[in-house]
Amino acid sequence: MSTSRHIIRGSTQVVGLIGWPVEHSVSPPMHNAAFAELGLDWCYVPLPVHPDRVPEALLGAVALGLRGFNATVPHKEALVPLVDTLTDAARAIGAVNTVLLKDGKAVGHNTDAGGFLRALNDAGFDPQGCSALVLGAGGAARAVVYALATSHARVTILNRTPTKAIALAAEFSPVSPRARLQGGPLDESPIQQASLGVNLVVNTTPLGMWTRSSRIADAEHDEISPWPETVPFPREALLMDLIYNPRETPLMRQALQAGARACDGLSMLVHQGAEAFTLWTGQDAPVDVMMAACVAILGGE
């Protein structure tokens, strides 16, 4: 990995991340490490944008000549009606996490679904026709369920508000006639029933995530798991927890103690970023370099 300090010039191509907040993001060092590795005169910057000012931010990015940007919460859904064109994935998922700016036009992409599938591949898991249990029905779940539906999986979505899970299952059922989707409540009995014979468990909830304020102050929240202690974790299943900070969540510990395999969300983060990198630059992303930059910040292996 190149360690030389990049000098910003008039020729430097600028991309970035809009969100509210963005100071906790590892995307700037991840992308800047990739630019340095390939010797590209590019720079990635965090751009805090208030939720009320997303339309202005998009117009400003075009006016300033940015080559594109990523979007994180809570702006992914807000960009859908604002961009000039949507990819099929972004339209289906209902969220834009990557914008490509070219010739004054904004194309909205969603690289989360592809990043999720590549992360499964890293874990040696083939989702084709699998039986999956998805915890949560928010924005992250939409990309996961879409990716699993395109893989013709049997998917059970469980959420604290079951109507959201049921609606999400109904919305994505047409993605593949071979997929089987259903929704229900995120409670002990449905979890126990859905875990029988499952191949894959995906946590899309924030439970167990370190908050940006203080690990100590939020210790009680950090130790929460969406999986009841009274329900054995299926040892034959792979757990993918989309949380990547901390590198080992309480849910991951439950899975590992049961003898199952478990991985965090860092691989998905890197792969969705790598796809965005290629969209902007036209070059293959140095995935190993991007991963190393994230690990250096977050710790872990």
Image (cartoon, grey):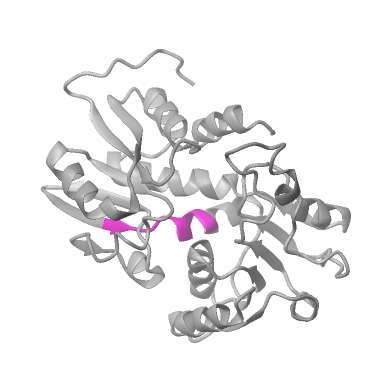
**Most distant residue in the front direction:** 217
Question: From this viewpoint, is residue 176 visible?
Answer: no
Relative depth, front residue between 248 and 146: 248
Question: From this viewpoint, is residue 280 visible?
Answer: yes
**Residue 115 is inside the magenta segment:** yes
Residue at 25% x, 49% y: name it.
100
Residue at 79% x, 75% y: name it.
188
Residue at 50% x, 83% y: name it.
167
- Residues shaded magenta: 108-116
Coordinates of residue 99 in the picture (x, y in percent) = 28, 51
Coordinates of residue 67 in the picture (x, y in percent) = 23, 40
Left or right, residue 116 beside residue 244: left
Q: Quadrant of the C terminus?
A: top right
Left or right, residue 192 beside residue 34: right
Residue 285 falls in which quadrant of the image? top left
Coordinates of residue 243 in the picture (x, y in percent) = 62, 50
Coordinates of residue 282 in the picture (x, y in percent) = 29, 41
